[in-house]
Amino acid sequence: ATPKTNMYQSLHTAVIGPRGMPVEVQIRTWEMHHTAEIGIAAHWRYKSGETRPGSGDLDQQINWLRQVLDWQRDATEPAEFMESLKIELFQDEIFVFTPKGDLHQLPNDATPLDFAFAIHTDIGFHCLTAKVNGQVVPLSATLQSGDTVQIVTSTHQKPNQTWLEVVQTAKARQAIRRYFKEEQYAESVRLGQEILERELKRYYHSAESETLDELASDLGLADVEHLYAGIGSGDLSVSRVANQLVPDRPQRRVRPAARDERGIRIQGMHHMMINFGKCCTPIPGDPIIGLITRGRGLSVHRTDCPNLSDLAEDPERLMAVDWDIDEDKAFTVQMRIRGNDRKYFLSDITRVISDTGANIVSCATKTVAHVAEETFWIDVHNTRQLHSMIKRLQGIEGVMEVARVDEAHAIDPPAPN
């Protein structure tokens, strides 16, 4: 009876007993029974006069406990740790060899990639291909007990998201997840530094490292790196940071038009409260129409607003209007960009938006099945600027979709920090 990694060991069989009833038989030594019924901790609870197990058994028990602690350390959430533990406890196992004859225990259905991570995490990260019994096989191949596995590595190789669908062991899965989490953090640091420096340059200002250290501390962050990471990930508003570094700076280079602000001039209407429909978020250049509301003045909508037919129950409340807006005013639109989840994808998007002169108010990101979906709230002057930005965004490598989102189908922006 070959023991599992949790040291469970027993011989099981089933026979047909009297009256045709099945009977399960389990055959164990006393030591095996202690482990099965009480757990591996039983090996440290000997009564006086009992024999202590050999040092080899003790080493196996300690190694297994150390492995459990490693899973707990690498797991980002308690649920992830419990998932890993259950997988390892209840899987059948196979035994495979290195070319030098070293034996490794792996769960049933393990792959060469699992074997690479079992040897060492760095070997797993740089695993290029594998040879099983002298034959080159894909990393997703299923290993069998008795296989001899040789891992071929390359310094240019690195993990990719598809590996998470290949590996079967908790150690490999958590190592890959940790790699991507650290890579995402490093990208957020780089992007956050770039965004902050770009913001400060607009006001001919640069921040000394001592000032940034002090600001990070004031914000409850460990260091400047975490400050940059917060900006790059969208958890920390760059405007908030810039306000503290340059207190007397203008709040924005362009002044967004308030949705109920008096003084927004629309031809044919004077001295009347004007607001813009949140259901379609019109911007200068959009064909628009006015709707006289009860108690809220004139509500301006795009002519293709899906809610207009419901709002305009009385045709006499509709009024023809035109844009006559100041060039320095900006209007917020929501954009959705979908594309292949790759390194610097978010950075490329923000650079294009900035290059068109638009201002990023906030953003939210998510990734599903290796497809990144970036949602931006952006201040633009008019549709000409918006269409130019969309065209340039569509030219970014890996972009699948660029769309302006109506508020009726939109999500709320992240709360400001």
Image (cartoon, grey):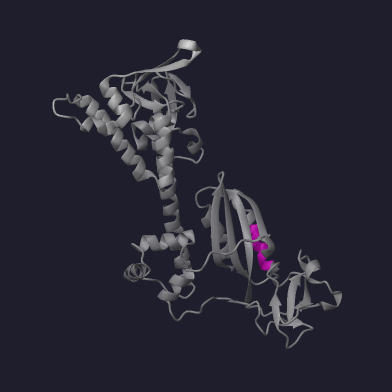
Q: Kindly indicate the quadrant of the structure image that contains residue 404.
A: bottom right
Q: Is residue 155 visible?
A: no
Q: Residue at x 43, y 45 (%)?
A: 79
The region drawn magenta spans 384-392
- Residue 72's spot in the image, x, y percent? 35, 43
Residue 369: x, y in percent? Answer: 57, 44
* Picture coordinates of residue 319, whole percent (x, y): 82, 78
For the stretch drawn in magenta, the main secondary structure is helix
Q: Is residue 369 left or right of residue 233?
A: right
User: Is 391 in the magenta?
Assistant: yes
Residue 99 in sight from this viewpoint: yes
Q: Is residue 362 above or below residue 326?
A: above
Please determine whether, in this image, residue 306 is positioned above or below residue 18.
below
Compare residues 13 and 113 and report the one nearer the observer.
Answer: 13
Q: Is residue 93 magenta?
A: no
| Residue 320 image position (x, y, % from top left) | 82, 77
| Viewer-closest of 152 and 83 | 83
Q: Residue at x 61, y 55 (%)?
A: 337
Q: Quadrant of residue 330?
A: bottom right
